[in-house]
Image (tube, rainbow, N blue to C red):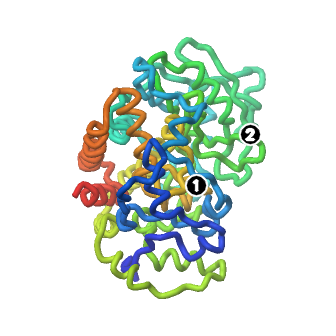
Amino acid sequence: MACKHRYLQLDPSPFAELAGFEQLDTRKRAAAETPAGKIPESVQRRSNTLFPGPLVLPHDDLNYDPDCSPQSCRSWSVEKSRNKMTNRERDTIYIGRIPQISKEVDFMRQWTIPNTEQSSTSEMPSPDADFFVDYIKAFYHGMNVQILPQQLTWTSWDKSTRPKRRVSLPKYVGLANADQATTRIRVRGVSDNIFDAQLNLDDIIDTAISILPRNAYALLLLVDHDIYESEEDDFCCGRAYGGSRVAVVQTARYNPSLDMREGIDRSHMWPMSHCKTFVDELCLVEDVTIKPPTKGQKDGSKEGAIRAAIDAANGYAESDDEKMAVQALWFARLARTVSHELGHCFGIAHCVYYACNMQGTAGMKEDVRQPPYLCPVCEAKVCNAIIKELRGGGEEDKISWISGRCAALRSFCHELDSKGLQSAMWVGLDAWLSVRAQ
């Protein structure tokens, strides 16, 4: 029987205390929203039905790092390594298309295909970069967002060591820019064998830094291959070097055809991840004593933004076209990560205040449980960067920006129907935004 998601988990899970995590109190969270870092005279209590706390489930990021230092709006504003938006000529976010594959390294196409039971969706192309441009325009409302003009291309680094068989990996491949300047990219095998090869993230970052346009505030490159950062890594889904204003996100690990292997419960991705029954079941494996819902939990489960999001998402019927449904799900996951990594380019650290798009993540299961929206603290940072630093606006402009941003995100959610990219996450986000706007 399908879960009805009757009761909601809007505070950190029962496991959070065992993990050593304690959410900051209301007054400290309110102070964290302000550029001065002071507790406002009248504290606006953020309802957990609108902005719930981080779940902190077993093997989540905050399970491993429960004492992660919070970054308030004030600490963000004085961060020395942050690129302040004082140069008004740098007002554009660029999204780089997936690099093309030249004939001499045609074997790299196989590296993008997961080694799972083949299906009609296994070899589908990843979502087009243009879709991310539209989303980032809404998410970072007020920024110019464009596709990077130049096309990157995978090529050979040393033609004498070109592999003749699929099982033979070259030590390096090349990543060439439009001027044919080529960066050496390290190659290695994959420990879990989900893909045939991985590419080194740091080497790809070097390419991104070398082609950063003069008017760019940030550049994000999309790559279709699995990537790794250090020799100890299994893999890396994405990484931003905020000080250098560049980021890389891979599409490979977000492929929905890997869900069964990863153990992802699609019926409890965000917003359904706030289902108390689901949370309790995950906590049971750590011998946590599960308690029945309190009166407060029962009341908070009846209405509010998260309830509206769950009801809308749970009622959404995905496309009968399997390829279209997979493409929509793939895009939703990547869009959340693209906006997250660009947040690091804005100097925003991982969030510990609320459930938030800027939370850290320890794996794909946690990734799909996290929300696509920004919490009040992280949204205040983006607002200050764009409105105060870049545009020179005041407090009234900030209020208008928040309202305009919500409207832009809702408009984006509505337009996805015509593009065949609608999914439960976007339907849930639209419902969440509608309650927030009230």
Residue 370 against residue 150 in the figure, above or below: below
Residue drawn at x 59%, y 46% is 237
Residue 296 against residue 254 in the figure, above or below: below
Residue 357 in the image, given as x and y percentages of width and height: 46, 51
The amino acid sitting under disc 1 is Thr
Residue drawn at x 50%, y 64% is 25
Residue 235 in the image, given as x and y percentages of width and height: 67, 47
In the rendered image, is residue 126 in sight? no
Dot 2, how many residues are within 10 Å of its Cα: few (below 14), some (14-19), or many (20+)?
some
Per the image, the residue denoted by label 2 is: 188
Mark 2 or 1: the one toward you:
1
Per the image, the residue denoted by label 1 is: 361
Q: Nearer the viewer, residue 146 or 295?
A: 295
Q: Nearer the viewer, residue 122 or 8?
A: 8
Residue 51 in the image, given as x and y percentages of width and height: 40, 61
Q: Nearer the viewer, residue 207 or 70?
A: 70
